[in-house]
Image (cartoon, rainbow, N blue to C red):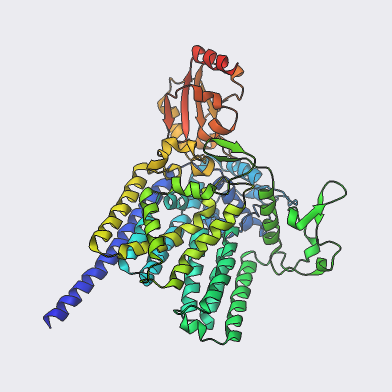
Amino acid sequence: MYSAVLGRLRRIASERSYCGGRAVFAIVHTALLGWLIVTQFPTRNEVAHVPTGLSYLATGSFHVYRVNPPLSRLIQAVPVWLAGADTHRLEAIPDEPGGRPEWDVAHVFANDNVARYGTLMALARVPGIVWSLLGMWLVGKWAAELYGRRAALLASLLWCLGPNVLAHASLATPDLPCAVASLAASYSFHRYLRCPTTPAAYLSGALLGVAQLTKFTALTDYVAWAVLAAAACVAPSMAAYRSLPPARRLGHVVLTGVVSILIINLGYGCEGTLIRLGEFDFVSRPLSIPGDTGTRRNVFAGTWAEGVPVPLPANYVRGLDLQQADFEGTRRSYLRGEWRDHGWWYFYLYAALVKIPLGTLALAAIGFVLSFTPRFRRFDELIVWLPVAVLWAVASAKTGYTMHFRYVLPALPFALVGLSKAAEVRPRWGRVLVWVLASCSVVSSLCVFPHSLAYFNEAAGGPSNGAAHLVDSNLDWGQDLYRFKDWYDSHPDARPVFLAYNNFVDYRAAGLPQLKATPGDPVHLTPGYYVLDVHSLHADNRAYFLQVAPVGRVGFTMRIYHLSAADIELILADQH
């Protein structure tokens, strides 16, 4: 009797500790995201994502920013719409083959709402908190089911306080929604394979379709799921799935795919569904060939396939085509101080090694090695790690352009689930080591906060040395403009000020006055204060500033230089 009561009390205490711990993580995570939402200026892509979502609501057409599906933008635009944003000029945006009108839309929206621009963009970021809390719940739930509650706590902690999650959950972009939606779909698919019922197949297909509506990156889920479905036919732990008649298994596969396609169509309001293949104005090389007038024409025109109706929304198909064309073009990529017109196959691996906390990298290595031990079921490990491998392989194969670590962000929640098993290691000293590594990751992240987007780990030299490794969305995405305004207002004697700022909207949207532009040619330099963001410093022919020591910085992304006449003479002499 006494032992039973004591055991019951221990279980209650354990349950409360588990639930309480995850609740604390969620509260802290929400508070940190709230701080980031209001203190960061809208980043380079956000400025187009939000007004594009508003254009969808205003017109019901999805041709703007078609290189990404619309779901996350629609959700982010709702609170801005309800706040009464001015959208009258977003209702007549031309649709041209291969066009990218979203950058013009960014200017229009900022100019029409300049008085409330910061507030409206902050409202668009609020749904990111919900997406991220859902992500925390999913990584914890899946980790608990596979490995136990300690694993769930570890995965939840690293999600809530990881720098990459904090950085992207606080932005109105589709990267984190794609990561969460893909995780939700794969978790549902795993549950279906364990208990293969028709309703479970419906749910998996629906969630797979939702993931496709967040970002084209989620197309890799189809590849991973096909492999997993085949592996489940022979996996010893998938007895229920193996016991299904082959015809029923095939029926479930077809059902899942059809439901996902139906959800994609519903997400686009069935706009342009069933347009014939020959009617598309394709621009990418696989789908078009050079025409007689220097333009490109549909590769299917004049063939038997031109009359085939495409069971997908027209702008979904055009978006895939345009996205492929973007990767085919000449776009500069940057890595370790080098710019070139094509990328590196190892870019994402290198980026992970410098952008992920060292403690988390160590835990990922431990978790991956443990996957091969007899204690853990092979198929469970495969369904966690295979989506990571497929996404990484596809992204690394596109070497025409490698610039953004966020392209592989959807792999992160799967990796957190996979590494979480390290919390269940034996003996006890091993678990102590695991939590020490987790604590190191958290401390490393919080020491950089609120500059989480600019996070680089200690081996990379921290965010101060970030530009030696990566730029653009990995470091400087225009987020520190509000901080520059604070510096400008608090230094009235620092005049004149010249600015080089890389964003798609006018810096005056932050409340700054008209400032002189930093010249690209040092011959035009005059004495004064020069403020350059890191991207401009390294990418726009202004590297001559690297010869001069900055007198200050704004966050980790903007450098302040005070050039005297003597400094300018030194720069000009060095140029010759």
Residue placed at 63% from the left, 68% from the top?
Answer: 266
Establish if 559 lies above or below 190. above
Q: Is 82 or 94 nearer to us in this picture?
A: 94
Q: Is residue 136 at least partly visible in the picture?
A: no
Q: Is residue 41 at least partly visible in the picture?
A: yes
Residue placed at 34% from the left, 43% from the top?
Answer: 447
Q: Quadrant of residue 149?
A: bottom left
Place of residue 339 in the rendered image (x, y in percent of width and height, measured from the top left): 59, 37
Query: How many marks do you count on the picture?
Result: 0
Question: Left or right: where does residue 296 sit relative to residue 518?
Answer: right
Establish if 565 lies above or below 6. above
Place of residue 220 in the rendered image (x, y in percent of width and height, measured from the top left): 58, 63
Question: Left or right: where does residue 62 sit relative to residue 121?
Answer: right
Place of residue 521 in the rendered image (x, y in percent of width and height, measured from the top left): 61, 22
Q: Is 327 or 365 nearer to us in this picture?
A: 365
Place of residue 450 in the rendered image (x, y in percent of width and height, measured from the top left): 39, 43
